[in-house]
Image: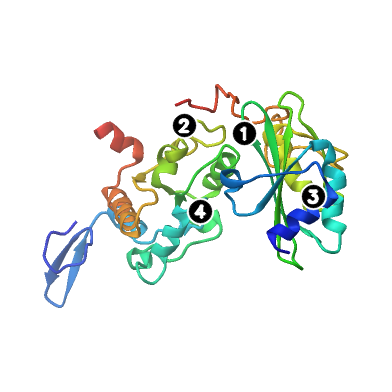
Amino acid sequence: MSEQPNKPEFPGEVHDLPGGGVVLSKIDDLINWARSNSLWPLTFATSCCGIEMMSTASAKYDFSRFGFEVARATPRQADVIIIAGTIVNKMAPVLKRLYDQMGDPKYVIAMGACAISGGPFFYNTYSVVKGADHVIPVDVYVAGCPPRPEALLHALISLQEKIKMGMTREQIKEKD
Amino acid sequence: MLPEELKNKLTEILPSAIFEEGANASSGWLTVNIEPTELLAFAGKLRNDPSLHFNYLFCLTCIDWKTHLTMVYHFDSTEFRHVLVVKAKLDRTKPEIESVSDIWRTAEFHEREVYEMFGVNFLNHPDLRLLILPDGWEGKNPMRKDFEDAVNMIKL
């Protein structure tokens, strides 16, 4: 990542030469940079977090500014799934299937208390999955019940940084 | 019809009806307690009497009081806009009540839900089977207060 001021966040160095310039970079970094700036989320909401997610998508917060251009209604065209809401035992196989249908590389954000741990439905319920990570692997967790749009935006930007680092979930876990 | 008029009319139809007063009638709606065996005949009159005309069953549910179950029916008349709540006490070990799905078609689904959640047996229901719960939940009744599930439930 370039440290020069007033330069776009581009992975590589720009060498000015007479009559033009040369960019030096690594293809992996370039791919990760491109990927992280074009993450299309899947339209997937199971509870009130979905309302906050819609708010984040709409004009006031507008996650398109950061490359989450449009929400796609099919997993085939989506890069990231934002689990916005409670996952119940009956929904779990559907979530797994949607995740499996997404093309690689794919990323997962667990939005809100329900998606993290079952939240308010942790105790004394027969139907709620105690955390979406029992079903599919999660990249970023957002606390809140529901989280504000700013929190979701922060999570989305954290995911971009994670992708730019170029490591997989497993590699990051080992590093810690 | 005003609540007082409604009360007189219902007493005429079913003299054994007990009206809830004071704190019990906290919903603000006229509430009447009946015997489960009286339900079908009473419900038919509620719908068909021209001065009552309760043509809309907007809520059908059940409550587990640990000692007994209570069926709760909320009726509305789209013509007169008066509301009536009917309650019937059921035996918890063998809960049985007549289905009202012949009178209000919507009850068919609601009764299936009460059947799966509380295990109430609706007599003469056309299609009494699980509504929302997946296969294998027959007879488990998760909304009963004493329901236990060692696999899916974490007790507080």
- Disc 2 is placed on an element classified as loop
Give the residue displayed 56% in from the left and 32% down from the top.
Answer: A126
Amino acid residing under circle 3? Thr
Amino acid residing under circle 2? Tyr
Q: How far apart are marks 2 and 4 (CA)?
A: 22 Å
Q: Can residue B63 be seen in this view?
A: yes
Q: Is residue A40 visible?
A: no
Q: Left or right: A33 with respect to B54?
A: left
User: Which quadrant of the figure has residue A140?
Assistant: top left
Q: How far apart are marks 4 and 3 (CA)?
A: 50 Å
- Disc 3 is placed on an element classified as helix
Give the residue displayed 27% in from the left and 52% down from the top.
Answer: A161
Pinpoint the chain carrying mark 2.
A
Disc 1 with disc 2 on a shared chain? no
Q: Distance between the residues labelled 1 and 2?
A: 14 Å
Q: Please state which of the two labelled residues, at mark 3 or mark 1, is closer to the viewer.
A: 3
Q: How far apart are marks 3 and 2 (CA)?
A: 45 Å
Sequence-wise first label, 3 or 1 = 3
Number of residues whose C-alpha sits closer than 10 Å to that of mark 4, classed few (under 14), some (14–19) or many (20 or more): many
Number of residues whose C-alpha sits closer than 10 Å to that of mark 2, classed few (under 14), some (14–19) or many (20 or more): some
According to the image, label 1 marks what residue? B143
- Where A88 sits versus A19, above or below? above
According to the image, label 2 marks what residue? A123
User: Which quadrant of the figure has residue A76?
Assistant: bottom right
According to the image, label 3 marks what residue? B11
Any mark on residue A45, and which? 4
Sequence-wise first label, 2 or 4 = 4
Q: Please state which of the two labelled residues, at mark 1 or mark 2, is closer to the viewer.
A: 1
Give the residue displayed 26% in from the left and 48% down from the top.
Answer: A165
Amino acid residing under circle 1? Met
